[in-house]
Image: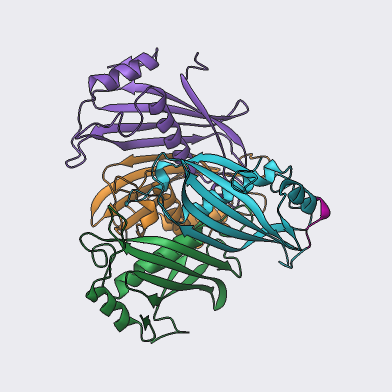
Chain colours: A green, B cyan, C orange, D purple
């Protein structure tokens, strides 16, 4: 049951500590919201981080993050965080994220993760179970 | 005296609270590091935020942020944060940022700010003093 | 329906960003957890912060906070945050807080708030509606 | 050269991200300031954390923290954080902390650390080199 192309969404409430002197959520905290949404995405597809998705000899590392700020969230707002695995490469996955408040689009963004060896940081191909779990969850994912 | 095209740089030390279970700085904190660098940039050009740059009836709002993670910073690392006003529009400014540790490039990114009316969020042209201060500081800035 | 003397409790899940290199929640974040619990306490008694409890000409300021760390919370733990208005003075309120994970006591603490004028920071007596709402919620509260 | 009984002090500047909608530093961040001050204290006495003070088979864990809020710090304020090892037990150390802005006392507090085995969390006696370094730095420390 997708909503606007997002197979997963969750709600979170803005904390007092996250709102700055302008009365709006400080820009960096949206990356934390993205992280929380992605954490719940992994849980939703049956591969809770880290034990589900990060195997022996590999872990996920953020390679790139982008945030577009369309509107401002304020204290106590209940936000809807929608997460989609937009691109799945051999050893990387790109999540597309949208944050809305009562339907109004506040934030869009992307986070690119690379699956890599914790010691050497060499990229590692995702195991088949990770690829299958994402593909099964995302009807529209583009498998390269 | 520019270094690698950056007229401004500052140092900061990674805090214990900023390092996660992977032993590296959590990805969202780099936007806070960017914010600290930009704060000091405004001070360096003689327009400390908010009183110097944000006038009556206008304030700065982040419109877009990008972070590329090339390497990981760890606890207690001393980081060099370099900031440059890369593009100056009528009512927006784009800062390019690089973070290095002992010369090694760890992070690059951009933050786009829009000067806007706090009430309506309508974009406002930067006053001449802001444009002049940035242009005077940046020899290579592209004035549109 | 009190549980262990606490009329209010809520659940929250530990975020990745809150866990440090020791693999446990960084000590300062427990004060944020306390703040979240107290926010929900005000909502539960019908006086959501700030509009419900902070009136015209007064706001709440933290005067004192104490945290006792009995055990460590880790990533993804679901914590139960219990909040009680333990003491209600003329212009101050002391919240007692307990944090548990699956029944195990991890943290206890207190936060003392003073109701004060935002400009002068002079203490202001709580209005009757605040006192009554707290007293009605807490059967065991000691009214001075 | 002690100042007001504190052998160690350092300066830090309040970040934008640390100031809340009331225009003051959010209460939890003072524990982060305490942590930063204590980190620099360990460095100042020649035992940088973790390698200097935490040996093989032991690490420091916060057992208790207290903060008294006397005044509010605001954005961009330069704060002086003074740290003193007030009590040194067999396996614990209590730091007393004061934060001032241009001489005005804003915050006082204490943080109690226990030296413990990371696996079992059993308390471990501080090695002689830690006790000696603290004693040498603090003329007035009370050795139990």
User: Extreme right residue here?
Assistant: B128
Percent coordinates x, y for residue A62 in the rendering: 40, 61
Quadrant of the rendering where the N terminus of chain B is positioned: top right
Percent coordinates x, y for residue A121 in the rendering: 32, 56
Is D56 on the left-hand or right-hand side of C3? left
Q: Residue at x 38, y 36 (%)?
A: D65
The answer, for residue C86, to whether it is visible in the render is: no
Q: Quadrant of residue A58?
A: bottom left
D78 or A118: nearer the viewer: A118
Q: Quadrant of residue A120?
A: bottom left
Percent coordinates x, y for residue D128 in the rendering: 24, 19
A92 or A106: nearer the viewer: A92
The answer, for residue A38, to whether it is visible in the render is: yes
B11 or A20: nearer the viewer: B11
Is B138 on the left-hand or right-hand side of C88? right
Q: Residue at x 30, y 32 (%)?
A: D51
Boundaries of the magenta span = B125-129
Q: Quadrant of residue D12?
A: top right
Percent coordinates x, y for residue B4 in the rendering: 59, 47
- What secondary structure do most residues of the magenta stretch adopt? loop
Q: Does the segment drawn in magenta span residue B127?
A: yes
Quadrant of the rendering where the C terminus of chain B is positioned: bottom right
Q: Looking at the picture, does residue B25 appear above or below residue B115?
A: above
Q: Does the segment drawn in magenta span residue B12?
A: no
């Amino acid at each position: 049951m997708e909503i606007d192309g997002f197979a997963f969404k969750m709600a979170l409430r803005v904390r007092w500590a996250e709102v700055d002197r302008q009365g709006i959520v400080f820009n960096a905290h949206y990356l934390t919201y993205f992280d929380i949404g992605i954490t719940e995405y992994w849980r939703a597809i049956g591969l809770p981080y880290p034990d589900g998705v990060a195997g022996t000899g590999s872990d996920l590392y953020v390679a790139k993050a982008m945030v577009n700020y369309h509107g401002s969230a304020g204290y106590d707002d209940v936000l809807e965080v929608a997460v989609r695995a937009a691109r799945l490469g051999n050893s990387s996955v790109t999540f597309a994220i949208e944050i809305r408040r009562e339907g109004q689009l506040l934030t869009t963004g992307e986070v690119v993760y690379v699956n890599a060896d914790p010691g050497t940081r060499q990229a590692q191909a995702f195991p088949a179970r990770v690829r299958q779990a994402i593909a099964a969850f995302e009807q529209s994912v583009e498998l390269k």
